[in-house]
């Protein structure tokens, strides 16, 4: 995977709520331990890892002030692609650029941009208060994606997903949830859960697998995305990158996380899908390049 050095980073799609405005990569804070080491972390991630963001505390949320001054300066520098936050901003730019064109074509709906919030340790959201232990998430109440960038160290060091393409995969999955919110899939699923609580987890799995499929569809088309001046954002995405995406999907499957936390595999507790299912649906989206192929709700 190679990003285009000439591509402009649109930091207006980011809300930087890290301490002091962040900048310079955003990797200088401690890793979250979420209640006690890797086992505690994995148990927490079982519920909400790379998910819809519905595991945050049901407290009164509210926006905190963002300060994009540092990230704007960092992402306008010659070495911007060496900065973790600037690379992730470009991933966000690519994902939203693609959906802006593709959503009307595929679903007849206009795309509405959603900012990604960079935070450290804890954050207030429209869905309530959250900390780094919940992993990246999308909040449908305020239509924002939230991520503490140290999560990528957790993926690499503790969950074994060390490839660079894990990062855009995670973000593309979260923006898949934004699309589900825009076209009504998420709201329909919530109503189904209310009518049939016994099927709530199975419905959640379908929602998550569809977001994985949407991530794959974006990945297939990512090299066609461009910045505001028409310069390509990616110069290449290779087979190795897609393998890294598949490896990440495998690392965060419900069954794999349950095993790593010392639990027996319990399908009744699945909320995101098995490793094999997550790989399958990412691959489905990638092979077709078409989000309309991602009808997980029409599949048993």
Image: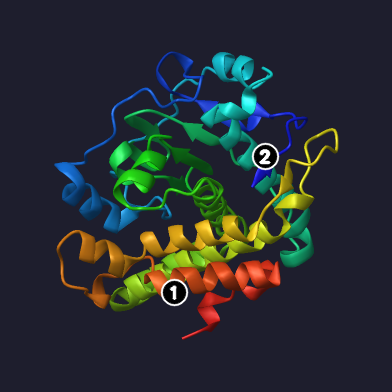
| Nearest the eye: 80 or 278 | 80
Q: Are marks 2 and 1 in contact (CB under 8 Å)?
A: no
Q: In terms of image quadrants, where is residue 82?
A: top right
Q: Name the residue at the right extreme.
A: 230
Pinpoint residue 207: horizontal percent, then vertical percent: 47, 67
Residue at image position (43%, 39%) is 126
Q: Report the side of 137 relative to 112 (left or right).
A: left
Q: Name the residue at the front extreme.
A: 240
Q: In terms of image quadrants, where is residue 51?
A: bottom left
Q: Secondary structure at mark 2?
A: helix
Residue at image position (35%, 69%) is 194
Residue at image position (51%, 19%) is 23
Please give the label number shown on residue 93. Answer: 2
N-terminal-most mark, 2 or 1: 2
Q: How many marks?
A: 2
Pinpoint residue 206: horizontal percent, then vertical percent: 45, 72
Pinpoint residue 169: horizontal percent, then vertical percent: 53, 53
For disc 1, the marked residue is 277
Residue at image position (38%, 46%) is 156
Q: Report the side of 47 relative to 209 (left or right).
A: left
């Amino acid at each position: 995977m190679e990003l285009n050095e000439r591509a402009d980073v649109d930091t207006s799609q980011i809300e930087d709520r890290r301490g002091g405005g962040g900048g310079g990569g955003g990797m200088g804070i401690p890793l979250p331990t979420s209640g006690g080491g890797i086992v505690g972390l994995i148990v927490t991630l079982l519920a909400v890892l790379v998910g819809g963001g519905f595991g945050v505390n049901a407290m009164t949320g509210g926006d905190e002030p963002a300060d994009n001054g540092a990230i704007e300066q960092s992402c306008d520098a010659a070495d911007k692609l060496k900065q973790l936050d600037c690379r992730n901003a470009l991933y966000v730019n690519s994902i939203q650029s693609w959906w802006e064109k593709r959503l009307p074509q595929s679903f007849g709906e206009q795309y509405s941009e959603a900012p990604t919030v960079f935070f450290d340790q804890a954050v207030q959201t429209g869905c309530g208060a959250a900390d780094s232990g919940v992993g990246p998430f999308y909040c449908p109440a305020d239509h924002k994606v939230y991520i503490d960038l140290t999560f990528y160290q957790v993926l690499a060091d503790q969950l074994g997903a060390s490839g660079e393409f894990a990062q855009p995969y995670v973000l593309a999955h979260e923006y898949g949830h934004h699309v589900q919110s825009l076209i009504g899939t998420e709201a329909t699923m919530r109503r189904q859960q209310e009518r049939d609580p016994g099927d709530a987890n199975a419905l959640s799995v379908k929602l998550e697998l569809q977001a994985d499929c949407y991530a794959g569809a974006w990945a297939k088309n990512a090299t066609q995305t461009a910045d505001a001046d028409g310069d390509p954002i990616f110069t290449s995405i290779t087979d190795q990158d897609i393998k890294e995406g598949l490896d990440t999907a495998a690392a965060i499957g419900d069954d794999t996380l349950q095993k790593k936390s010392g639990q027996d595999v319990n399908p009744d507790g699945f909320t995101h899908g098995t490793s094999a299912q997550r790989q399958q649906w990412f691959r489905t989206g990638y092979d077709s390049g078409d989000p309309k192929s991602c009808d997980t709700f029409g599949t048993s």
